[in-house]
Image: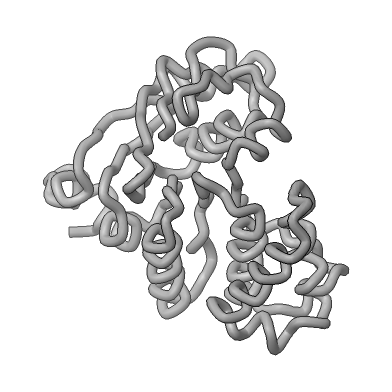
Amino acid sequence: MLSVEDLHVSWGDLEVLHGIHFTAEDNRITVILGPNGAGKTSTMKAILGLARVTRGSIRFDGVDITRMSTRERMRRGIALCPEGRQIFPTLTVKENLEIGAYLRSDARAVRDDMDRMVEWFPILRERWSQPAGNLSGGEQQMLAVARMLMSRPKLALLDEPSLGLAPLMVERIGEIIEKIHADGTAVLLVEQNANMALAVSHQAYVLDAGSIVKAGLSEEVMSDPIIQSVYLGV
């Protein structure tokens, strides 16, 4: 579904990705692991057209999208749940979900999807008319994921969804990622929480200092002694 080839990304004069290659298949959860500053968020932004690609290509569903606008990429079925949630705090839960569907014109299906989101995330029904800024961190993360899903993406990009959450909520996030995949949506996950990410994913890449340093099936990456030592605390 997604193929990234020789991708170079720069912020100003600083190159932060140095020719990375990876794929995300439509029937898998793919994870990119790495420490702070490795280039994970820059990778996600490049896929959605929010970062400057200086070399390389990004293909989605067989089409080169490297120079397409963010709007066109979203229309083709890519959606991002950003790092730090970035919900609209003064808008209600309902209004945040409506924003997630702003490119859609199928009003009845949008209403059906809103009903589906509150079935998936019952806490959102309880908070329906409250300003999103009043929600807890975990509740805001649920809202951010639901808002992304309101666009009906083919590929869901989740950038550090467990960041700053309590262990029980991290476990819940892992379950949600698996549910998104089971519902037929491909997932590309960026995470520092290697234990959770490798447990739910099928394919894994390790990004460090802007380069891919390890790639393989998640169970293979999990059993690598270096990965265990550096990322899993074994």
In what quadrant of the picture does the N terminus appear? top left
Q: Residue 53: horizontal and vertical position, in percent?
A: 59, 18
* Location of residue 19 by image quarter: top left
* Depth check, front residue: 214 or 232: 214
Residue at the location (43% across, 62% down)? 183
In what quadrant of the picture does the C terminus appear? bottom left
Residue at the location (70% across, 89% down)? 126
User: 111 above or below 86?
Assistant: below
State how the image is colored.
Answer: one colour
User: 181 above or below 27?
Assistant: below
Outermost residue on the bottom side: it is: 126
Residue at the location (48% across, 63% down)? 162
In this picture, residue 48 sits left or right of residue 16:
right
* Location of residue 106 by image quarter: bottom right
Q: Residue 39: horizontal and vertical position, in percent?
A: 49, 33
User: 55 above or below 101?
Assistant: above
Residue at the location (41% across, 67% down)? 179
Outermost residue on the right side: it is: 90
How many numbered discs, if any? 0
> Would you say residue 83 is visible in this rendering?
no
* Depth check, front residue: 40 or 225: 40
Q: Residue 134: horizontal and vertical position, in percent?
A: 77, 79
Q: Residue 150: horizontal and vertical position, in percent?
A: 65, 59
> Would you say residue 35 is visible in this rendering?
yes
In this picture, residue 223 sits left or right of residue 195:
left
